[in-house]
Amino acid sequence: MNTTFLPVNPPQRLLMGPGPINADPRVLRAMSSQLIGQYDPAMTHYMNEVMALYRGVFRTANAATLVIDGTSRAGIEAILVSAIRPGDKVLVPVFGRFGHLLCEIARRCRADVHTIEVPWGEVFTPQQIEDAIRQVKPRLLLTVQGDTSTTMLQPLAELGDICRRHGVLFYTDATASLGGNLLETDAWGLDAVSAGLQKCLGGPSGTAPITLSASMVEVIRRRACVEAGIRTAAHQDGDDEMIYSNYFDLGMILDYWGPERLNHHTEATSALFAARECARVIGEEGLDEGIARHKLHGDALLKGIQGMGLETFGNLEYKMNNVLGVVIPEAVNGDQVRKLMLEDFGIEIGTSFGPLAGKVWRIGTMGYNARKDCVMQTLSALEAVLNRLGLRTTQGAAMQAAWDHYSERC
Ligand SMILES: *Cc1c(COP(=O)(O)O)cnc(C)c1O
């Protein structure tokens, strides 16, 4: 066995895929701070600050706003395993891969899962969702806001009212969209939202910010009482099932983050520092200004790709600001293009899954990489690689189109 291990020294990459992306250097610096004990007043103060900062990012007054230690799906799983009782009906509008993930996790929670689907590259109308709610009568509506697998952004603004009228709890996975696209937790009537740091929030994966409405907290608290052997008047049929996870039991996690500070896990300190710095940086720029920045650079990339003569994927009216699907021209091999981009330019762009595998690249402009220099470098590298592989494009057209877009806007 080779016993010489060199220090960690990863190659320099520009990550322009659908996530993860390069972390903001300020976030990396915050993560290198020394550790402190989990009940040190300085630590609990940071935890309270993280709650306050993410209320700003989620646009909510929810007291129950905190971070789950784990990647984005830890946030999804914590919410679903804590909210869904076995046998509960849930409705999942599926418009890409992450809708299927919600179905899979909900099935593991023993939910009775109902789906509606649209072709990849499209989204649902509020009417389609309301019709399905009428038919299925679910207890929860589980949605994805931005599905990076198709680059589509599901409009959510009107769904909260529909859910309230039908007595349905409303959840969305905003991992890929939060910080780069508008999300209004309170104004849109969302009961639960989860996210992750590695997309528009500009941090590393490993932390999942979540927020829960008072009604969602009540649902979870009722089950916590059952676990403790306490039956209250609030218990209805079907409430007598405990949460089948310790790590993701939001009742216990809320008691850890709340004034009781009941021991649950050991909060991941370095990850907490990262999450705090991501939200602080967003607050410093301004959430609306950050969303506008994602739109500016996302549109510049789109103009550049169109200027190069390439076709885009999906209904552009509902495209996320921060990721673009590009149809792979028949004349080239998509993986060979990605390989040359990585090896010769140090730039990573994304491939696709399922029905889009081998047909679409996904190029992201998000978080720290939603910048003009990143867009221009990616366009020039892609143009060079395509021409190298024999796909003739008008040299320089992509960059000129992106420049034109910037000079019209700035
Ligand atoms: C990227 C993404 C995730 C990622 O989940 P991880 O557990 O952090 O890998 C989840 N949901 C959506 C919608 C995403 O785009």
Image: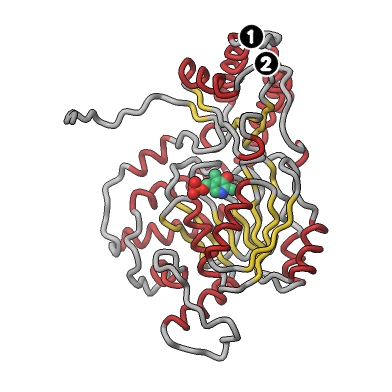
Residue depicted at 63% across the width and 35% down the height: 323
Please identify the quarter of the rendering in which residue 5 is found: top left
Q: Residue furthest bottom?
A: 233
Mark 2 lies on residue: 331
Residue 331, given in percent of the width and then of the height, sits at 67, 16
38 is higher (above) or lower (below) than 151: below
The quarter in which the C terminus is drawn is: top right
> Of helix, strand and loop, which one carries label 1?
loop
**Picture quarter with the N terminus:** top left
Residue appearing at x 36%, y 39% in the figure:
29
Compare residues 114 and 76 and report the one nearer the observer. 114
Question: In the figure, 341 relative to 50: above or below?
Answer: above
Is residue 369 or residue 233 the one in the foreground?
233
Where residue 147 sits: x, y (%)?
Answer: 63, 45
Are the two marked residues, 1 and 2, in contact with CB atoms closer than 8 angstroms? yes
Label 1 beta carbon less than 8 Å to ligand 1 = no
Q: Residue 138 placed where, x, y %?
A: 69, 70
Which label sits on residue 390? 1
Q: Which of marks 1 and 2 is nearer the N terminus?
A: 2
